[in-house]
Amino acid sequence: MALEPNFFERVYEVVKLIPSGRVTSYGAIARYIGAAKSARMVGWAMNKAHDLEEVPAQRVVNRLGLLTGKHHFGGTNAMQQLLESEGVVVRDNQIQNFEKVFWDPNKELVKPR
């Protein structure tokens, strides 16, 4: 019998699916995994993800497109540089054209059971 993955693992599985050049929010991930009021917990999961190469943590921002997790990346502008290397435009710690690059797992993926 397979064990239910823990909350952080469920978050990481969604984050791994975010396409390069796109971003999503903590809240969108929380809603997708069935924990709508747990955006802050998604943030905690992302804080722990920066050493996991397979989890593109830079692609998760707040609901306004702000790089709120940037202090968890090595270097002052590492999160911004990673996003810009994927073609995302960032100005003053905020994603430009946020609506255009926003990836909503609730619309893009089949809901988990």
Image: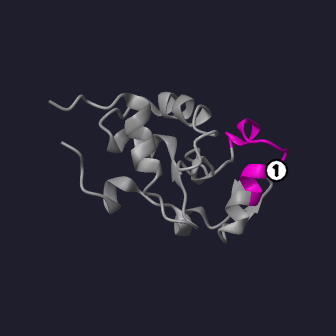
Residue at the outermost left position: 1
The C terminus lies in which quarter of the figure?
top left
The N terminus lies in which quarter of the figure?
top left
Q: Name the residue rendered at 61%, 33% in the picture.
A: 47
The picture places residue 109, in percent across and down from the top left corner, at 30, 58
Q: Please rate how many residues cluster around mark 1, counting C-alpha atoms within 10 Å: few if below 14, some from 14 to 19, many from 20.
A: few
Q: Name the residue rendered at 44%, 32% in the picture.
A: 8
In this rendering, the answer to whether 52 lies above or below 38 is below
Q: Nearer the viewer, residue 108 or 92?
A: 108
In this rendering, the answer to whether 36 lies above or below 16 is above
Q: Name the residue rendered at 55%, 33% in the picture.
A: 43
The picture places residue 86, in percent across and down from the top left corner, at 65, 68
The magenta segment is 68-81
The picture places residue 31, in percent across and down from the top left corner, at 35, 41
The picture places residue 90, in percent across and down from the top left corner, at 73, 61
Q: Which residue is mark 1?
A: 77
In this rendering, the answer to whether 36 lies above or below 65 is above
Q: Secondary structure at mark 1?
A: loop
Q: Quadrant of residue 44?
A: top right
Residue at the outermost right position: 76
Q: Is 107 left or right of 100, judged from the image as shown?
A: left
Q: Is residue 78 magenta?
A: yes
Labels in figure, total: 1
Q: Is residue 14 magenta?
A: no
Q: How is the image coloured?
A: one colour
Residue at the outermost front position: 1
Q: Name the residue rendered at 20%, 32% in the picture.
A: 2
Q: Nearer the viewer, residue 101 or 109?
A: 109
Q: Is 111 left or right of 12, judged from the image as shown?
A: left
Instruction: Identify which amino acid the numbered label 1 is placed on.
Output: Asn
